[in-house]
Every structure is written in structure tokens, then in C-alpha cells.
Image: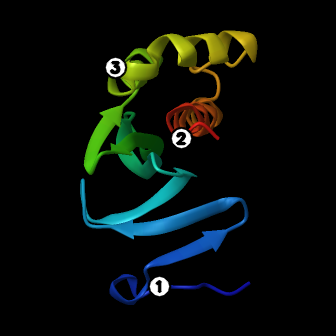
Amino acid sequence: HREIELISEKVESFGIAEHFFVRLQSPVAGFYDQIYDGDLKVYSKRYKLTQDILTTKTKTIEFLPKEKLFILKNGIYHPVSSKGSVLKVLIERKSELKKLLAEENISFNKNKEFALQRMGAYFDQLNTGK
């Protein structure tokens, strides 16, 4: 078992298993999981928050996984967290994207990353006519 440490300033991107991470300067500098890469781009920033759990004799620290999702459209990063917020960013194809989710029985809340991949790909397909 070996530990790998990246010198982040020298790394632009890397892959681990099914994930491809890219270094972005915006919205906040760091590594983001690239969920979809087309004309439209979708990124996830994962991090952990700590929560102290105190009892009379012990202190336990719990790490809570968190995620922030962003759509890069026309050079602007849009934070998204719900199907409604995504549809607001992709307003010009709102009805088609809603229909896609319904026809493919995709639950945004149950699998946000998959839903965002499909929505991003379909949005690009509709806009490029491919």
C-alpha cells in the first residue's frame, strides 16, 4: 500500500477509476470531477465537513461528504443542486430535457451525476443537431 501525493500546481488533470479530475481556477481553485465534457461542461467539487459528536466521556469526529455541482455554459459557472436549478440554467431546452428524464425514467435526486451526464449530452445534441 503506497500513498500518492500530488503537487497540485504541476498537475492539470488526472484519472482515477471512472473519474477524470481537472484543475480549475474558477469557481474556486481546485480539482473538480468532470462529469460531462462537451460544449456544455458539468463539474463536481467533493469535500468533507467535520462534525464533532460530544458525549460525557468521549469526543468523536464524523466526516460528512458534501458535493457542489456546476454547469459551465457560455463561459459562466452556474451552481446547481436540483433538477429545477439545472433546468433554469438550460432554460432554452427545458421541455425537451424534462421529457428526456421522464422517457428514460431518470430520477435526478437518486443519481444526480448520471442525470447531469444525460442532460448535458442531450442539450449539446439538440443544440448542434448531431
Residue type indicated by callout 2: Thr
Looking at the image, is mark 2 or mark 1 earlier in the sequence?
A: 1
Mark 3 — residue? 88
Q: Earlier in the sequence, mark 3 or mark 1?
A: 1
Front-most of residues 99 and 125: 125
Which quadrant would the N terminus be assigned to in this image?
bottom right
Q: Which residue is mark 2?
A: 128
For mark 2, give the secondary structure: helix
- Residue 66 image-quadrant placement: top left
Residue 82, can we see it?
no
Q: Give the structural element (helix, strand or loop) at label 1.
A: loop
User: Which mark sits nearer the N-terminus, 3 or 2?
Assistant: 3
Labels 2 and 1 touching (C-beta < 8 A):
no
Disc 3 from disc 1: Cα separation = 37 Å
Where residue 36 sits in the image (x, y, percent)? 56, 49
Q: Please identify, in this view, whether the residue under mark 3 or under mark 2 is nearer the observer.
A: 2
Q: Are marks 3 and 2 in contact (CB under 8 Å)?
A: no
Determine whether, in the image, residue 2 is placed left or right of residue 83. Answer: right
Question: What amino acid does circle 3 point to?
Answer: Lys
x and y, in percent, of residue 103 in the image: 73, 11
According to the image, label 1 marks what residue? 6
Q: Residue at x 36, y 40 (%)?
A: 51
- The quarter holding residue 30 reads bottom left
What's under tag 1, amino acid-wise? Leu
Badge 1 crowding class, 10 Å Cα cut-off, few under 14, some 14 to 19, many 20 or more, is few
Q: Residues within 10 Å of mark 2 (few under 14, many from 20)?
A: few
Of labels 2 and 1, the one closer to you: 2
Of the two numbered discs 3 and 1 in the rendering, the one whose residue sits closer to the viewer: 3
Q: Is residue 71 above or below residue 105?
A: below
Rendering coords of residue 69 (x, y %): 41, 40
